[in-house]
Image (tube, grey):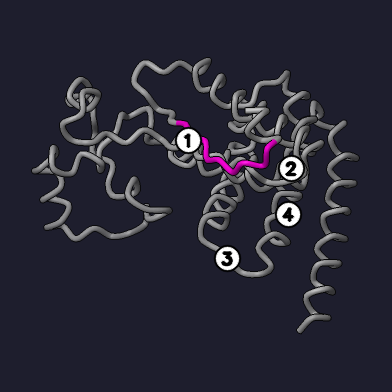
Amino acid sequence: MQFIISEGTNCILSFIYGYPFEEEEDLEATLQTIFRIKQLERKVSDKRTVTIQLHRLTFLPETDIAELQYDKLEYEGINTMSYFDENVVIPDEIKELIQNNKRGFLNCYNLKENMSSFRIHLGDFVCFLFDEMYYIYPLTIDKLIEANEFKIHSLLEELFAIEEECFLELCRFHNLYFGSDKELIMCEVFYDLISSLINNNNRYIAVSPVLDKEHLGAMKNYDYKTSIQNDTR
């Protein structure tokens, strides 16, 4: 990875979570790998070269893993098929078709332990955190992880528990909004999210001055880029 990054080669690294018999330690190992790669990228390059993808496991027809777990898969709906459509009303005839043809619509089924809102969107938030915010708030994120004894999964669970709506909105916004003010909005909401975490747990109090400093730098940088864009119009 160090050679690839140092040469400026763009790459996409894809990870999957939610496997049967997956322990928390396994998921933590995946998150730690992502974190170390992003730390390495920051150390050896001043460019964004590594894109992270973290997907929840989807069970597909006629695959070995789907056959082995078939009887344990429960109906989930269509929220595995696109971003944030949990509130979509499925016509009764369509729902009945899906439920009566499990093998044909297996991507609408999953393991029960994978079906919480946190598990569904964990991958979205990890990509937001490390593909977007780590370039702007690297020291803040490093300090957060350090303050939580270098445990990333439990840190994300804590963020979700404190600010579930904000957590999910950041995932949705990161994936679906492409306006010129996207970075500004993400920074402001991220700042509020981490501030809420700090205010709710003294363990993170030492992160506060680092967060404030990096956020101030982000706002100044946004103002500078905006002024440059306005001058060239």
Earlier residue among tags 1 and 4: 1
Earlier residue among tags 3 and 2: 3
Q: Residue at x 24, y 58 (%)?
A: 90
Please identify, in this view, whether the residue under mark 2 or under mark 1 is nearer the observer: 1
Earlier residue among tags 2 and 1: 1
Badge count: 4
229 over 172 or under it: above or below: below
Q: Residues within 10 Å of mark 3 (few under 14, many from 20)?
A: few
Please say whether residue 152 is one of the residues in the magenta stretch: no
- Residue to which mark 2 is pinned: 194
- Residue to which mark 4 is pinned: 187
Marks 3 and 2 in Cβ contact (< 8 Å): no
- Residue to which mark 1 is pinned: 14
Local secondary structure at mark 2? helix
CA gap, disc 2 and disc 1: 26 Å
Q: Residue at x 88, y 54 (%)?
A: 216
Residue 7: x and y, percent? 68, 37
Q: Quadrant of the N terminus?
A: top right
- Residue to which mark 3 is pinned: 178
- Which numbered disc covers residue 49? none
Q: Residue at x 68, y 46 (%)?
A: 48
Please identify, in this view, whether the residue under mark 3 or under mark 2 is nearer the observer: 3
Q: Residue at x 66, y 48 (%)?
A: 132
Q: Going by the picture, which residue comes out furthest to the front?
A: 7
